[in-house]
Image (tube, coloured by chain):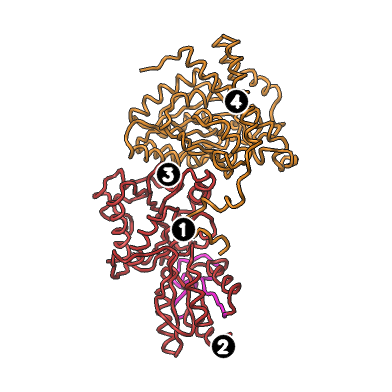
Chain colours: A orange, B red
Amino acid sequence: MDEVLDSGRALALYRTMARIRAFEDAAEEASKGGVAAFGASLSAAMVRGPLHLSTGQEAVAAGVCAHLRKSDLLTSTHRGHGHTIAKGAALERMMCELFGRASGTNGGKGGSMHIADFSVGMLGANGVVAAGIPIAVGAAHALRARGGSDVVTCFFGDGAINRGPFLEGLNWAAVHALPILFVCEDNRWAATTAAESITAGAGALARSIAIGVPGTQVDGNDVFAVWQATAKLLVDVRSGAGPRLLHAITYRVKGHVSVDVAAYRDVAKHDKALERDPLVLAAQRIGAPEQLQAIGREARGEVAAALAAAHAAPWPEPRAAYTDVQDTGAGRWRG
Amino acid sequence: MNYAQAACAALEDAMRRDARVVVVGEDVGRGGIFGQYRGLQQAFGAARVIDTPISEATILGAAVGMALAGLQPVVEMRVVDFALCAIDELVNQAAKARYMFGGQGRVAMLARLPNGLWSGSAAQHSQSLEAWFAHVPGLVVVAPATPQDNYGLLAASLACGDPVVYLEHKELWGLEGEVEPAQPARLGEAEIARPGRDVSVVTWSRTRHAALEAAEIAAARGVSLEVIDLRTIWPWDRDAVLTSAARTGRVLVAHEAVQVAGFGAEIAATLAEHTDVRVRRLGAPRIPVGYATPLEDESRVTPQAIAAAALDLARHPRR
C-alpha cells in the first residue's frame, strides 16, 4: 500500500519547496514598508498590509500536499502561500493577488490573507485563527455526499489549538467519521508569543488523541518524514476510517508578519533553529547538488516572471468593489 | 397549518426537489425543539438531516464549508442568542467568502436564528438582533410573521443563493393560518397587513400582530392605521414604506428590538432624508430582558403602546 519515495518523488518534493521559498522571498521583498503598524510607510510596498510568510515551513506544505489529488479539498491559514502553491495554484495568479491586481486568483479582493484557488480545490486561506477547521468539517460532509475517496486537508497552526473550533471541529469530525486530515503546522510561535508559554499540556497531538482523533507527530522540517507520515494517515482517511491528525513540528523563520523583525526571540535559539532549514536538510539527503541548484534557479526564474507579470497587471476597476457581494438587494449600497 | 409546520413543509419540498439541500444542527433528527424539522430525518436520512454536537461555531462554519463545496445547508441555531457563539463564522466567513475569494465560491445558506422575546426565558434567550445582521454586507435578513410567509419566504430564501439570516419568532411556532404553497413570496417585498389613512406603522415579525391589535384600538378612537409588515429586513421594501408615508404623512416604526440603533433607526433616517413626514420609533428600552414578569413587561412593545404612540403621532398635523 505504501508509495515509494523514489528519487523522482524526492526531487518533486524539493522542487515544491524551492518554489515556495522563492515565492515567499519575493513576496517579502515586495512587502518592504507594507505594514503601517510596524512604523514603516505604505508607499513603497507592492504587497500591502500584513504578509504572513511560511519561509522555513515549506516541508509541511510540500510533504502533505504531494499526496493530494486535484479533487481533494484544502483549507488553509493566514500563513497559506505554501499550501496554495503545493496544492497546485499558479504562481503568477498568486503574485497578482498579493499585488491586488485584477488578474489575481481572487481578482484583488482578498490578498495574501484570503488567497484561494477553487480550481485546484484550495478553499481559501483565512484571516481568523482556527476558522478553517469548521469550514473543513462542512466541506468533508459535501465530499461524503459526493461519494468517492476524496478528502479535506485542514491546515492550522499551534495557536489554533487554543481556540474553541479546534475542540468543536475535531470532536465533530470524529463523531461523524469525516474524511479529514488535520495538519497542525506547529511553528512554535503564536503571533509574537512563544506557543509553549501559552499552551498547557503536550500540545496538538495529545489533545487530538484525547478527543478521539488518532495521529502522528513528525519533524516538520524533514520533508521525507512528513511525506511518509502523511501517506500512512491518508490511507486511513481515504478508506473511511475517520479523521486523522498530523502534528508537524517546524519553525517560523520570519516574524509574525513580513516587517516584524521578531526582536522578541532569543538570538542563540533562533540561530540554532535556522540550521535546520528544510531545503538544506532535503538537499543533504538527496545529493545531486547541480540538479538541485538548477531546480532552485528554475523556481526563482518562475517567480521573477510572476513578479514581472504582477507589476504589469492592471488594477481592478473600482466598480468591481460592488460585485460578488450578494445578489439579493444588489445595488442598495447606501440604504 | 401552524408557523412551524409551514416552515417544515417548505423545507421538505425543497429537499425533495434538490438533493443539495441539507439540514445541520442540534436536535434536528428529533424534529427540532419547536417541531420545525419534524419528520425530515425519517424522510431524508441522517446524512441529509445532520445531528450535531452543541458546537454553534462549527455548525455555522461547517455550513460555510458545505456551501463552498456544493451543498445548500439549512442551519439550525436554536435561538438567535446562541448564534453569538458563531458570529465569526456568520460575519467573517459566510458573509465575506464570496467577495474575498473574488466570486470563486458562494455561500447559499439559510441560517435559522429564532429571534425575539421568549416569555420567562430572561436576558440570554430573548433578544432581537436583526439590526446587527442588517449591518453586515453580504447577508440577507428575513423575519416572517405568518405561516404563509414562513412557507413562502423560507422557499424564496433557499432559492436566492445568498447567505440568509432567517429570523423566525420564538413565540410564533404555534400560530395557525392558511398556507397556499403556490403563492409566491419575493424577498424584499413588504405586505400591507392592514390598509389605513392616518398613520403608517412599519413593523415586522411578531410586532405585526401587535400592530394589528393596535390598529383596532386606534380605530375605536377614530384613527386609521396602515400596518406594513416588512417581512424582509435586508433588503427592506423602501418603496412600499415611502409610498405609504406619502399617503399618510406620519410613520411609526415599531419593533421588539431595543430602540437604540435598532433597524427602525435606519427606516427613520431614510424617511428623514427623502420625505418631510413625521416619524416616530417605538422599540424596547435599552435594558436586558428581565425574568420576573414585571421586569420582562418593561421590554414588551404592546398593542397599547403602539396605539398610544400612533394616536399621539396622529394628533400632529400632516406636514
As measured in the structure, the alpha-carbon distance from the residue carrying label 3 to the one carrying label 4 is: 37 Å
- Label 3 crowd (10 A; few <14 / some 14-19 / many >=20): many
Q: Quadrant of residue A31?
A: top right
Mark 4, secondary structure of its residue: helix
Q: Which residue is mark 1?
A: A328
- Label 2 crowd (10 A; few <14 / some 14-19 / many >=20): few
- In the image, residue B49 lies at what x, y percent? 31, 48
Q: Which residue is mark 2?
A: B317
Q: Is residue A11 visible?
A: yes
* Highlighted range, magenta: B277-305
In this rendering, which labeled residue sits more in front, label 2 or label 4? Answer: 4
Q: Residue at x 67, y 24 (%)?
A: A270
Are labels 1 and 3 assigned to the same chain? no
Asked if the residues shown at circle 2 and circle 1 are in contact, with their CB atoms under 8 angstroms apart, the answer is no
Tell which of A194 and B73 is nearer to you: B73
- In the image, residue B91 lies at what x, y percent? 52, 51
Mark 3, secondary structure of its residue: helix
Mark carried by residue B62? 3
Tell which of A109 and A150 is nearer to you: A109
Q: Amino acid at mark 4?
A: Glu
